[in-house]
Structure formats: C-alpha cells, structure tokens
Image: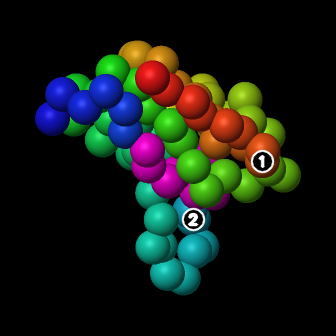
Amino acid sequence: RGADILICEGTYPDDASVAGAFDRPHLTAFESGRLARDAGAKAFVLTHLWHSVGYDHYLEAATEGYEGKVVLATPGIKLVAR
C-alpha cells in the first residue's frame, strides 16, 4: 500500500480477448489498473503487452481501473528515477 510505483503485467487488453483462452494465467489491463488503484500506487507501469493489439487499447483499459499516471512498458523503455 502507498507504493510510489506498481509494475504489473496486463497481457490481455480486455475481457473480450480472454474469451476462449483455455488457461488464463494473466490479468487484463483493467484488472492490473484496479490492483494499482487498490494499492494506492502513485504511478503504474503496465507490462507484458501484445504490441499487435495497439497500445491505445491498453491505455484505455488500464485507465478505466486506475486514475493515476499509467506508463506502458513498450520495447526499449527506460525508467530512471532518483
């Protein structure tokens, strides 16, 4: 609780993409956003994305569950903090 940043996977962009998945070992972007919200995180990094889906779709779903700053972990991203 009260973390500065939460890093969480959200492989599935939404519930529709989960339909038909035999084994669902991953979260949706919305579910990950809710975890960040419930943890009181000041910022949230969403990882393990399908680049073929389109990043806007992930951002929209994540921000439905979390109202703070959302960062998508895209290829080559570098997070530097002090």
Percent position of residue 76, x then y:
78, 44
Q: CA distance from mark 1 to mark 2?
A: 26 Å
Nearer the observer: mark 1 or 2; the answer is 1
Which numbered disc flags the more N-terminal residue, 1 or 2? 2
Please give left or right for residue 64 compared with residue 50 in the image. Answer: left
Percent position of residue 77, x then y:
71, 39
Q: Is residue 35 above or below residue 22?
A: above
- Give, as a single range, the part of the protein colored magenta: 7-17
Q: Is residue 77 magenta?
A: no
Q: Residue at x 45, y 57 (%)?
A: 27
Q: Is residue 8 above or below residue 80?
A: below
- The quadrant in which the N terminus is found is top left
Q: Residue at x 50, y 53 (%)?
A: 9
Q: Residue furthest front?
A: 82
* Along the viewing direction, whichever of 15 and 50 lies nearer the viewer: 50
Task: Please name the residue that numbered disc 1 is placed on.
Answer: 75
Q: Residue at x 72, y 29 (%)?
A: 56
Label 2 environment density (alpha carbons within 10 Å; few <14, some 14–19, many ≥20): few
- Residue 16 seen by the camera: no
Please give left or right for residue 77 compared with residue 61 in the image. Answer: right
Q: Please give the label number shown on residue 46.
A: none
Task: Please name the residue that numbered disc 2 is placed on.
Answer: 19
Query: What's the coloring here?
Result: rainbow
Q: Amino acid at mark 1?
A: Pro
Q: Secondary structure at mark 2?
A: loop
Q: Secondary structure at mark 1?
A: loop
Q: Amino acid at mark 2?
A: Ala
Location of residue 22 by image quarter: bottom right
Percent position of residue 23, x then y:
49, 81
